[in-house]
Amino acid sequence: MENKVSIFLQTAMGPIFPYLKAGPWKFGPFVIHMFGLLVGIAILVGVFMTNRRGFQKNLNPLYTSEMVIAGIIGLFVVSHIFAIVFYYPERILKEPLVLFKLWDGMASFGGLIGLFLGIFLYLRYRKQPFWPYADTILWGGIHAWVFGRMGCSFAHDHPGTFTSSWFSVRWPVNHPDQIFNPDMLPGRHDLGLYEFFYTFIILGVLYLTARKNDPFPGFTSSIIFMLYGPVRFMMDFVRTTDLTFFYLTAGQYVAIMISVFGVFLFFRNRKIHINGGVVG
């Protein structure tokens, strides 16, 4: 009887999330992976929502569309370079050309930096105000993030520590990574999955506060920075594959910077707006 109760409690209090797996699917010479499929959907959703938001805010549709292209180029280039330099630097010595293989490794914060760099250079070229357009592309980007992090949930490319917590993924007992689980703990933190869930909270806040328009230029950007930065900072403490620099990962340093910048941006642009100034 005691054994049955023990098994029941272990099952009931064990990890509640299943280990997601789907694909790959082969169609003739083509192979489709779930991660690639969802990233493709994320791009389409992001482009659509950005253009829709730009139309809603009466922004120039040509500039909005061209900005998206510039942002996506910057995202992929800097995302890859950031990932290789800060997460896999040993690969540079083995294969210097890896920096040019944009499809081989990406980092979310590198993508964010690249996105802003791309749209900054484009908007400066077009002599357009930065924050109205930046808010627009981040509005589309946070919708795209849902599908991007869903892809990470299937790829399991952001693994955390093994745990006995109920809030974790039930890791397969035959998974190769079990060699890092000497205590045979039943679950593992899957940070891609956690961010997928958390993105809906960020979206909920934005829809409650800026569904029709931004209260002031920079609002959407500052809200995303303030909400995402601290949570990402905490999540990185249970990451297992990232290099650390003075006890923190590269992602944590960026998380600190965007959190502080988000607070500064919110109060600065809000003050300028209230005082009747123009926020560029």
Image (cartoon, rainbow, N blue to C red):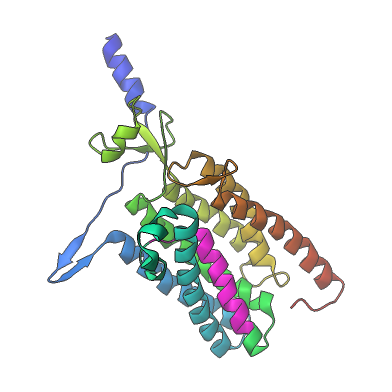
Q: Please tell me in which quadrant of the rendered image residue 43 appears.
A: bottom left
Q: Position of residue 55 (x, y in %)?
A: 57, 83
Magenta segment, prevailing SS (helix, strand or loop): helix
Q: Is 40 in front, or is 101?
A: 101
Q: Is 51 in front, or is 221?
A: 221
Q: Please tell me in which quadrant of the rendered image residue 136 appears.
A: bottom right
Q: Classify 77 as above or below 179.
A: below
Q: Position of residue 65 (x, y in %)?
A: 51, 84
Q: Classify 5 as above or below 151.
A: above
Q: Position of residue 230 (x, y in %)?
A: 62, 48
Q: Please tell me in which quadrant of the rendered image residue 202 appears.
A: bottom right
Residue at the farthest top position: 1
Q: Is residue 19 left or right of residue 29?
A: right
Q: Position of residue 175 (x, y in %)?
A: 26, 39
What residue is at 58 percent from the left and 40 percent from the top? 247
Q: Is 107 in front, or is 22?
A: 107
What residue is at 47 percent from the left and 62 percent from the top? 145
Q: Does the magenta run of residues contain 112? A: yes
Q: Is residue 277 left or right of residue 131?
A: right
Q: Quadrant of the C terminus?
A: bottom right
Q: Do we see residue 139 in this rendering?
A: no
Q: Do we see residue 181 in this rendering?
A: yes
Q: Does the magenta run of residues contain 90? A: no
What residue is at 47 percent from the left and 76 percent from the top? 73
Q: Is residue 211 left or right of residue 185?
A: right
Q: Quadrant of the N terminus?
A: top left
Q: Which residues are magenta?
A: 105-123
